[in-house]
Image (spheres, rainbow, N blue to C red):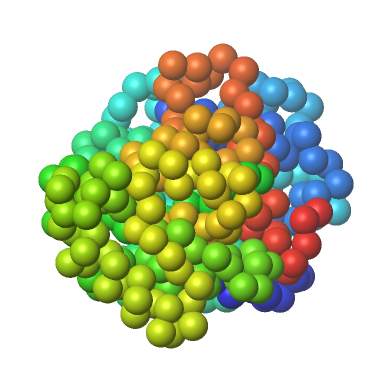
């Protein structure tokens, strides 16, 4: 469950992401672009972060630390907490097990810090799913790692920008599996977490629209019966708990209605149903918030961008938005 406030004196932790992608670059660029807002640490590989920082500003300084207590925020140096140590910088733009291991180490180190209460929350830079798979780790993404490390908590992904917020019933799985996973418990978990997440963002009485699984929300059973068998009963249960949920609404129109301020959150049934409308509206202001964890975690709404990694042109705007959301969720502040 998202905590709305925590100790504001603690730093946020930003993981470096996959060292072969744009993660280290956008983390370094965010640091350089926000000189008045540097009460945070990077969790990652010092060699990788030193190279990323120097490529943008050769005069910029970095401090290697082993605990958040070692960090200083008054001398203009980037604090990097050691989570892995590469002998050489991984090949930029290439999938490798070495990069996957380094990215995973940064994530798990940040989670340990969050669970220990030594940081305010976590902002994660992008990782590459193939690199994780190359290590033999059984995780399709950040969310699954976070859920397992948090004790198997029931979590959900919220994608948000200034216009719409979307919570997913299922995340990283095939479409066939997504249909099977869209059962009553999954519907209830997503609706409840959508309500909790919206309230944590300051929406006192969130209006939650639940999208249908089938075209036209099943068209009264003509195109499938999941809406009548599963989704509608879940909505009724949620309403009996005091949640303002409605639907199931057709997936091809409900996001337009949310953008028109009829709804505060849309519960989407599967990954692409929910993420396409959010990402179509632009990646720069999109943010991913993991709901259901005992600590705050946000991330940018884009991937590792191997095609532009190492070129010095990656835009940190989505990472900055994720950072601002983490501040908002932990202190109520936006700066």
Of the pair 71 and 149, the residue shown nearer to us: 149
- The image position of residue 198, as x and y in percent, is 57, 65
Which residue is the extreme one toward the bottom? 241
- Residue 227 appears in view: yes
Of the pair 230 and 35, the residue shown nearer to us: 230
**Residue 154 falls in which quadrant of the image?**
bottom left
Total label count?
0
Which quadrant of the figure contains the C terminus? bottom right
Name which residue lies at 49% across and 34% down: 279
- The image position of residue 195, as x and y in percent, is 51, 70
Q: In this view, does 296 lie to the left or right of 329?
A: left
Of the pair 199 and 8, the residue shown nearer to us: 199
**Residue 238 falls in which quadrant of the image?**
bottom left
Position of 131 relative to 267 (above/below)? above
Q: In this view, does 255 lie to the left or right of 189?
A: right
Name which residue lies at 48% across and 44% down: 255
Name which residue lies at 56% across and 57% down: 263
Q: In this view, does 244 lie to the left or right of 148?
A: right
- The image position of residue 36, as x and y in percent, is 86, 47
Position of 114 relative to 268 (above/below)? below
- Residue 145 appears in view: no
- The image position of residue 87, as x and y in percent, is 41, 34
Name which residue lies at 77% across and 50% down: 38
Of the pair 131 and 304, the residue shown nearer to us: 304
Q: Is residue 58 left or right of residue 135?
A: right
């Amino acid at each position: 469950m998202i905590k709305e406030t925590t100790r504001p004196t603690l730093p946020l932790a930003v993981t470096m992401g996959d060292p072969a992608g744009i993660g280290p670059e956008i983390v370094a660029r965010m640091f350089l672009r926000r000189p008045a807002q540097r009460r945070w640490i990077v969790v990652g590989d010092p060699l990788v972060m030193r190279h990323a920082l120097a490529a943008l500003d050769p005069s910029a300084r970095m401090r290697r630390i082993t605990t958040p207590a070692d960090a200083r925020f008054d001398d203009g140096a980037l604090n990097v907490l050691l989570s892995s140590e590469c002998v050489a910088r991984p090949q930029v733009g290439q999938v490798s097990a070495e990069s996957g291991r380094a990215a995973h180490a940064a994530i798990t180190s940040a989670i340990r810090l969050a669970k220990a209460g030594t940081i305010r929350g976590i902002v994660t830079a992008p990782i590459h799913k193939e690199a994780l798979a190359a290590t033999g780790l059984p995780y399709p993404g950040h969310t699954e790692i976070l859920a397992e490390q948090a004790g198997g908590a029931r979590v959900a992904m919220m994608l948000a920008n200034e216009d719409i917020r979307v919570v997913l019933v299922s995340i990283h799985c095939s479409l066939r599996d997504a249909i099977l996973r869209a059962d009553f418990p999954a519907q209830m978990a997503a609706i409840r977490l959508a309500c909790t997440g919206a309230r944590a963002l300051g929406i006192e009485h969130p209006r939650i629209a639940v999208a249908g699984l089938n075209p036209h929300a099943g068209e009264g059973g003509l195109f499938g019966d999941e809406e009548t068998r599963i989704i509608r009963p879940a909505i009724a249960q949620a309403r009996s708990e005091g949640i303002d949920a409605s639907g199931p609404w057709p997936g091809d129109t409900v996001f337009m209605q949310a953008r028109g301020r009829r709804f505060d959150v849309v519960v989407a049934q599967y990954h692409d149903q929910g993420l396409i409308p959010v990402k179509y509206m632009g990646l720069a202001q999109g943010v991913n918030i993991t709901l259901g964890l005992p600590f705050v975690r946000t991330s940018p709404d884009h991937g590792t961008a191997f095609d532009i990694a190492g070129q010095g042109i990656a835009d940190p705007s989505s990472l900055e938005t994720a950072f601002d959301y983490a501040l908002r969720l932990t202190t109520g502040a936006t700066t």
